[in-house]
Image: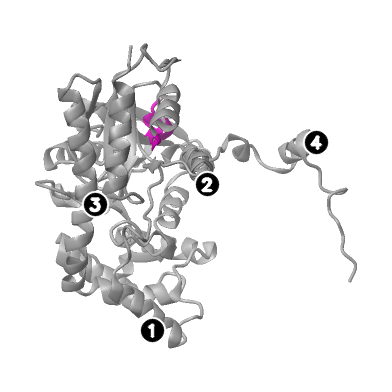
Amino acid sequence: MAVIDIAPYAPVGEEGAAFAKLALNRMSQGMSGSTILRIAGEINAMQAEGRDICNLTVGDFDPDQFGIPASFRDDIIAALQAGETNYPPAVGLPATRAAVAAMYERELGLKYPVDSVIMGSGARPPIYATAALVLEPGDKVLYGTPSWNNHHYVIINRCEAVTVEADRSTDFLLTGEMIADKLDGVRLLALNSPLNPTGTAYSAEQLTGICDVVLAENARREAVGERPVMVMYDQVYWMLTFGETQHITPVHVRPAMAKYTIFVDAISKSFAATGLRIGWGVVPPALSGAYKALIGHMGAWAPRPGQVATAKLLLSHEAISSYHADMKAGVEARLMALHDGFSAMGRDGLPVSSIAPQGAIYLSVNFGVQGRSCRGRSFQSDEDLRSFLLDEAGFGVVPFTAFGIGRDTGWVRLSIGAVSLQDIDRGLARIREALSELV
């Protein structure tokens, strides 16, 4: 068979860009790539050159640092060997959906019918389905900043973003007071706890205030026949909380929120299983039919062997507790090593501080270096700070500007899933040395 080289027929460069503008829709022109992945690519290139980099950028796990549960791995292999390689039902295997429902009742105290559980290949399909089913073009989506990826889903669904910038005073989380006058025209409120990128978690008081505002607004809308405000509650990190932090949901503080709350969840973070793509949505019963139909057409199905193994894992409180005894200890040890290291620098007069770990795999750190300089480099922006930390201290971070904050604040996210305690110790020493030369 003769080989056809497509190069003469498929334009690239400026001609290609002009063709893409004609061929693709207006929404595509508003989309952009991931800032986090761009930064990670830069770090990968430096590491390939032999640089010692403490890479705290991507929200993923190095299997050498955090492996999946051994029994879970064995059950996936057994499922493959047993021939579990054909299509699963589009909404998920019945046993897996039942295991999720049982786990929610056992671990969270939330009793949902199995029909409310819809599986997906990770958490992103349920997020996409929520936006696609709730929103019309031109609708408003309310979310706080910093937060993960909400702006991309607004663009994809041709909606309008209503953003509320949070700060250190509320641990970068929203409150009822902050959203009370922002709900006009809003159809979806996006919440995440523990929060990516900050690692902070909603308290019962904060969440109660938000829920009371939503319930009051929805009561008003129901009286005049308007569409309600729905709440998407992303809780993929809920099993990873530390110290006195307890995971709270809207339904816990106000059971009436069950009518309006759509949960997004996955095994990705809690079991270091990001690449296995097992996630789910838990939706109000009245909405499950629409979710099933859309997920079926999307084909974004969680792989069958992983679903078989996930059902067994989630049904075993003992297996979950045993795994988390080590895994959570490792996550918390790394977060605390960073927090303690930066706290010590702050006590020694260096312009750095952090928020004590509450949940997830992230630490929020502030560098108060705006307007200063070091080693011939000035700090006029968070990008200046990021590149300095990487080039001069071999310390990879992601600024909050990558999470929707539209101004330079000096706040950055550190993600610990791919580093050892030794990596952290060496990185902190290099930062201390560099910051000591600030002028």
Quadrant placement of the C terminus = top left
Q: Residue at x 41, y 51 (%)?
A: 127
Tell me which numbered mark, 4 or 3, is placed earlier along the sequence: 4
Task: Work out how far the residue at label 4 is from the one at label 1, CA to CA, in angstroms.
Answer: 51 Å
Tell me which numbered mark, 1 or 2, is placed earlier along the sequence: 2
The stretch drawn in magenta includes residue 396? yes
Give percent across and percent down for residue 264: 33, 54
Residue 409 in sight in this render: yes
Q: Which residues are magenta?
A: 394-405
In the image, farthest residue toward the left: 244
Q: Is residue 276 left or right of residue 29?
A: left
> Element at badge 4?
helix
Q: Is 225 in front, or is 276?
A: 276
Task: Work out how far the residue at label 4 is from the one at label 3, CA to CA, in angstroms.
Answer: 49 Å
Give percent across and percent down for residue 139: 45, 37
Query: On the image, numbered disc 2 is attached to which residue?
Result: 48
**Cβ atoms at labels 3 and 2 below 8 Å apart:** no
Q: Amino acid at mark 3?
A: Val
Task: Work out how far the residue at label 1 is from the one at label 3, CA to CA, in angstroms.
Answer: 29 Å
Which numbered dot is residue 15? Answer: 4
Q: Is residue 432 left or right of residue 242?
A: right
Query: On the image, numbered disc 3 is attached to which residue?
Result: 331
Q: Amino acid at mark 4?
A: Glu
> Element at badge 1?
helix
Q: Residue at x 42, y 15 (%)?
A: 380
User: Badge 4 local density, few (<14 within 10 Å), some, or many (20+)?
Assistant: few
Tell me which numbered mark, 1 or 3, is placed earlier along the sequence: 1
Q: Is residue 428 left or right of residue 150?
A: left
Q: Amino acid at mark 1?
A: Ala
Tell me which numbered mark, 4 or 1, is placed earlier along the sequence: 4
User: Badge 1 local density, few (<14 within 10 Å), some, or many (20+)?
Assistant: some
